Image (cartoon, grey):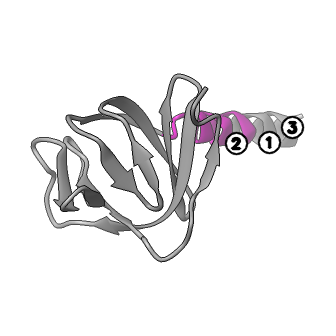
Amino acid sequence: MKISKLAFAITTFAIGIASAASAYTVTLSSATRVGQTELKPGDYKVTIEGDKAIFKSGKNVVEVPVTVETGAKKYSNTMLDSTGSQLDDIMLGGTNMKIIIKSSSAPVAAGLGQ
């Protein structure tokens, strides 16, 4: 009986952590290229799953390969770093996480232009 309660508690804890996978809101003020895809200005929900970032806005979904770095201190605000219109990194406000977008691969895009 104790083993099944322990297993249940561990499973519940693991599900809680998995569902807590944070989504962050990023606002693009102008057309911005993420990987090989140009995103229109607006708010995007960004989630990190392993080595990819998923940008969602309505039915538009764009996945790009990324590297996540952990900084020494938390960023006070979300900041976007770009070269021209190409998004290079996102420093997520309230965290010490920096998302570096890999531009060498083509992204997986679904629902664009709908």
Figure quadrant of residue 16: top right
In the picture, measured across the screen, residue 99 lies left or right of residue 9, that is left
Answer few, some or many: residues within 10 Å of disc 2's Cα (few below 14, many 20 plus, some between 14 and 19).
few
Residue corresponding to mark 1? 7
Q: How far apart are marks 3 and 1 (CA)?
A: 5 Å
Q: Give the vertical position of 85 relative to 59 (above or below).
A: below
Q: Amino acid under label 1?
A: Ala
Tell me which residue sits at (76%, 40%) in the image.
6
Residue at x 90% of width, y 34% of height: 1
Q: Do the residues labelled 2 and 1 touch (CB within 8 Å)?
A: yes
Q: Residue at x 12, y 41 (%)?
A: 77
Label 2 sits on what residue type? Ile
Q: Are marks 3 and 1 in contact (CB under 8 Å)?
A: yes
Residue under numbered circle 3: 4
When the figure is inspected, residue 86 is found, relative to residue 42, above or below; the finding is: below
Q: What stretch is highlighted in magenta?
A: 10-21
Between 56 and 93, the residue placed more toward the observer is: 56
Extreme-front residue of the structure: 113
**Is the residue marked by circle 3 packed among few (<14), some (14-19), or many (20+) residues within 10 Å?**
few
Secondary structure beneath label 1: helix
For label 1, count other residues whose C-alpha is less than 10 Å away and answer few (under 14), some (14-19) or many (20+): few
Please tell me which residue is depicted at 29% across the width and 60% down the height of the picture: 86
Secondary structure at badge 2 equals helix
Q: Report the amino acid beneath label 3.
A: Ser
**Residue nearest the viewer, comparing 21 with 83:** 83
Q: Main secondary structure of the magenta part?
A: helix
The residue that mark 2 highlights is 10
